Structures are given as structure tokens and as C-alpha cells.
Amino acid sequence: MDRLTAMQVFTEVATSGSFSAAADKLDMSRAMVTRYVAELEQWLNARLLQRTTRSVTLTDAGEHCLRRSQQMLALMQDVEEETASTEGALRGQLRLTCSMSLGYAQMAAAITDFLALHPQLKIDLDVSEGSVNLVEKRIDLAIRISSEPDPMLVSRPLARCDSLLVASPAYLAAHGTPQAPAELARHRCLSYANFGKSVWQLERNGETARVSVTSHFSANEATTLLQAALAGGGIALQPTYLANPLLRSGQLQVVLPEWTLPAMTIHALYPSRRHLSPAVRALLDFLVGRFAGVAW
């Protein structure tokens, strides 16, 4: 039995909580996944997973095995990447995470272009809005938008992230165009469920306006609110990297263009500077160069 492969299979089952999901991820049959886990348990002489008809959970032995398996797999990946880098080619697999809106608007194309430069690399992108334990999920790089990145992680700024207020021409024709921040209180607003849901802060020439808005539709993800704005659902706060193409096409219009919203930063986050693989370093440098001076 290939014990490293068995560890990889077990790790995927443990993290996904499903034999079927692991089989799909690894492009194996469910029977083969089951066999690898069974043979790993036989080799270790310990039961690693508790199986029921609805769930798969780790035993105490399984938790220890998962931690060690993740370390072994990470070490093996480092060996492959460092060996490959001495031959002038990057290979192996990188695991990234970013928000859905950034993945849709920017990262998918950026990753495609990066892989064209390094065809022997593979990249697995986890699109999620919530925080992710990078070590537990074996994530090499998290791309997050924040004014205060996680202090427990190493942060490298990639680009400034500006936002603005937008609405469809149809909505503005039907409900009027706000001429001052206070008028937003009388409009239908589309808000983030976990950020600025009820209060929007705007600035102009040193003047600050904090407006209590009525959120008729909130969501935890920017592209959903963008689609609602396109459908005439109201005024939405949107990052420029996502809204600019629609502003250029006329499908959306800027609301209160003389007022600005607090800017944030797109950060690349990773657990440690130590043992940073050549592939991760190459991707970081590529993203810094790609996003330098972008007109978002």
C-alpha cells in the first residue's frame, strides 16, 4: 500500500466528512477510498473514523493521525517543490482561499495566467466568505479584504480596495437619485449581513456622514448584492473591482459620486515566513506585480 496516498485519502475524508466527497475530490471510486482508509487503519492497528449513515467523525486516534498526516503531506509537498525549483520548474499543488466576489472578478483570471507560466503547478481554490483555519485546512495562501488583517498571520498587501454606492438606472428613475447622504435613509438599500448592515459611513473633503440605512435585502456576499442591484432592487455598496465593468457599460450608475467610502486593503495571508515554498513565493510576487497600479 502507498502509505502517503492512504494518508492523503484519509485526510480528505476527515476534512470533508464524507467518503463520497473525498472520492470526487481525488477522482477515485468510493470503494477505493474506503479501501485506502481500511488499510491505513489496519497498518496503524487503530480505528480512525466513526462511521454512521449520516456522518463521518474522527476518533481520538483519528485526530492524532490527521494532524501527523497533514504534516507528512505538507513536508512531502515541500520536498517536491524545492527539488523542482532547483531544476527551474515549479510543480506540486497550492491551496488558496478567497471571497467569491474576488474569485469571480479577479483571482480566476490571475490564477489562469499564473498557471500558464508554471504549467506543472496545480492550484485548488477554496471560495468562502468566512475565516478559515489555514493550518487545519492546509491552505497555503488566503486572499482577504480587510482593514485589520488577522495579527496571527503574516500579511502582504496586494492592492487597495475602494468601494462605492451603485444602483441600476431603472431603480434611480423610479425612486430618484439621492443628492445627499441623509437621503439614503429613504431608499431601499442592499447591505452586507456582517459588515455595515445598518450604518454606512461616507466622507467628503474632511466631512464625515454616518447614515442609518434600511436594509430591505442583506447578504454575506458581494456578487449576490450586485445582482440584486442590477435587477433594480436598490442601492448597494460594492467594491470597485467588481462594479467598474458594469459602470462602464451603463448597467449601473454611481450614487453620490462626490462622496467616498472607507478604503480597505487586499491582503495575502499565510501562517509563517519560515519554509515558505518557492511556488508560494512566486505566486505572491506575481499577484503583487499584477495588482500594482490597477485602476479599480
Image: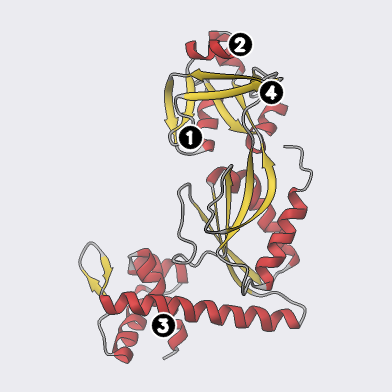
Decide which of 111, 204 is in the foreground and name it.
204
Q: Which of marks 4 and 2 is nearer the N terminus?
A: 2
Q: Viewer-nearest of labels 1 and 3?
A: 1
Of the numbered discs 3 and 4, the one sitting upstream in the chain is 3
Please give the residue where the numbered disc 2 appears in the rendered image.
180
Q: Real-space Cα distance between discs 1 and 2?
A: 22 Å
Q: Which amino acid does label 3 sit on?
A: Ala
Q: Is mark 4 on a helix, strand or loop?
A: loop
On the image, numbered disc 3 is attached to which residue? 6
Q: Which amino acid does label 1 sit on?
A: Phe
What is the three-letter code of the residue carrying label 4?
Gly
Q: SS for tag 2? A: loop
Q: In this view, does 165 lie above or below 264?
A: above
Q: Nearer the viewer, mark 2 or mark 3?
A: 2
Residue type of the residue flagged with mark 2: Ala
> Which x, y percent locates residue 290?
76, 52
Counting from the top left corner in percent of width and height, residue 53 is at 20, 65
Q: Reading the chain from its start, which is encountered first: label 1 or label 3?
A: 3
Q: In this view, does 141 lie to the left or right of 259?
A: left
What is the distance, in whole Å, between disc 1 and disc 4 at their CAs? 27 Å
Q: Which mark is residue 195?
A: 1
Crowd rating for badge 2 (residues with CA inside 10 Å; few <14, some 14–19, many 20+): few
Q: What residue is shown with label 4?
A: 250
Quarter of the picture holding the N terminus: bottom left
Neighbour tally class for label 1: few under 14, some 14-19, many 20 plus, Cα within 10 Å: few
Badge 1 element: loop
Q: Earlier in the sequence, mark 2 or mark 3?
A: 3
